[in-house]
Image (spheres, helix red, strand yellow):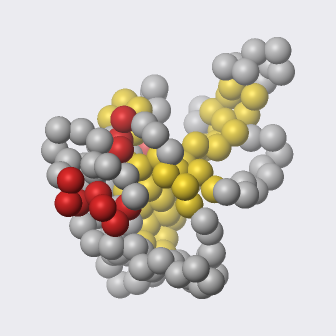
Amino acid sequence: MAGLTAILVAVGGPAVGGPAASANSAAAYGIPTRVEPLRCLKMPALATGAIPKLLSQTGAFSDTARMTPSNGLIPYDLVVAFWSDGAQKSRWVAVPRGKIDYSASGEWKFPACTVFVKNFDLPIDSRNPDANRRLETRLLVRDSQGGDNGVTYQWR
C-alpha cells in the first residue's frame, strides 16, 4: 500500500481456524490454520464498482450487530497504535488466495482483493469498560489493478 509501512501482529480469534482451513494455506501467515475469505468480501474489485450501501452488505461480518467477523477475517493489531481521541479500535484483514510480500524496511505488497476492516468504538463510562458507543467501521480494499479504495460506514 503506497506510503504505508506497518507492523501487523495476528491475534487469536475465531477467524484464525475453522473446518474449511487447511494446514498448507496458513503457513505464510504465521497462524496454524486459515479459512480463505470470499474474494474482496462483497466489495468491488475496482474503485469504479458499486460500493454496498450498508455495512451488513459488505460481507465483513456474519453478524453485524454483534460485530462477529466473517469466516476468513484475521484479527490483528499494530505494534504501535495511533491515537484516535481515546477511541478503541478493532482490526481484521481478509487476505484472499495469494501471499503478502513482506519487507523489513519498506512497503508490504498485498494480493488483489485484500480487505482491511477497522472499527472505532468510543468508551462512554470510565467505570464500565464494556460501555462503548460505536462510531464507524472502515473498509480499505486493495483493488485488482493495484490501487486502494475505501469506504467509511457510520453507526447510528
Q: Which image quadrant is residue 2 in? A: bottom right
- 25 vs 55, left or right, is left
Residue in the picture at 67% in, 19% down: 130
Instruction: Examine the rendering and report whether any part of residue 135 can be seen.
Output: yes
In which quarter of the view is residue 18 placed? top left
User: Is there any visible trace of residue 46 in the rendered image?
Assistant: no
Is residue 10 or residue 146 the one in the foreground?
10
Residue 137 in the image: state x and y as whole percent.
Answer: 55, 46
**Position of residue 107 measured from the top left corner of the image (x, y, whole percent):** 56, 82
Q: For this view, does 91 lie left or right of residue 69?
A: right
Q: Position of residue 31 (x, y in %)?
A: 37, 52
Name the quarter where the C terminus is drawn: top right
101 shown above or below 10: below
Number of numbered discs present? 0
Residue at 80% x, 19% y is 125
**Which residue is at 46% across, 32% downward?**
67
| Residue displayed at 41% across by 49% down | 74
**Which image quadrant for residue 143?**
bottom left
Name the foreground residue: 156 vs 97. Answer: 97
Q: From this view, report whether residue 33 is shown above or below residue 104.
A: above
Residue 92 locus on image (x, y percent): 47, 50
